[in-house]
Image (cartoon, grey):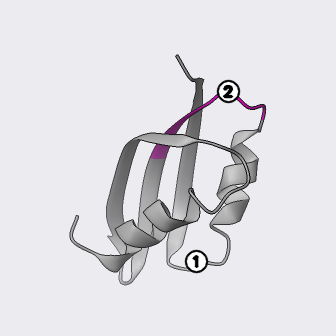
Amino acid sequence: MDSPVVEEVRDVIPASPICVHISDLHVGRVGKGKYAYILSLTTDQNAPPAYFKDLFSVHEELVRITVELSPSQ
């Protein structure tokens, strides 16, 4: 998707104090100026998906959030 919201998602993750890698990202429009995303992350650290969802709470245009965590290999 060619939208600034994709870059917003990509910018939030590296700013986290928890070291993670984005392994997959899907963003789709679900309404006028509203987006859903599915984010797959890999990490060796223990953090619940809710932690990463909370990082995006300042972005009001992101309304449906799915975060999947997998251990790094």
Q: Is residue 43 magenta?
A: yes
Task: Name the residue that disc number 2 marks.
Answer: 44
Q: Residue furthest top?
A: 73
Q: Residue furthest left?
A: 2
From the viewer's perspective, is residue 60 above or below residue 69? below
Residue drawn at 38 percent across, 48 percent down: 25
Q: How many marks?
A: 2
Q: Which mark is residue 13?
A: none
Distance (Cα) linking label 2 and label 1: 26 Å
Q: Main secondary structure of the magenta part?
A: strand
* Residue 45 screen position, x and y as percent: 74, 32
Report if the CB atoms under discs 2 and 1 are less than 8 Å apart.
Answer: no
On the picture, is 37 further left or further right than 49? left
The N terminus sits in image quarter: bottom left
* Residue 35 screen position, x and y as percent: 42, 69
Question: Mark 2 packing: few (<14 Cα in 10 Å), some, or many (20+)?
Answer: some
* Residue 73 screen position, x and y as percent: 52, 16
Q: Circle 2 — which element?
A: loop
Q: Which mark is residue 59?
A: 1
Q: For residue 56, which quarter of the picture? A: bottom right
From the viewer's perspective, is residue 49 above or below residue 62? above
Magenta span covers which residues?
39-46
Amino acid carrying label 2: it is Asp
* Residue 41 screen position, x and y as percent: 53, 38
Amino acid carrying label 1: it is His
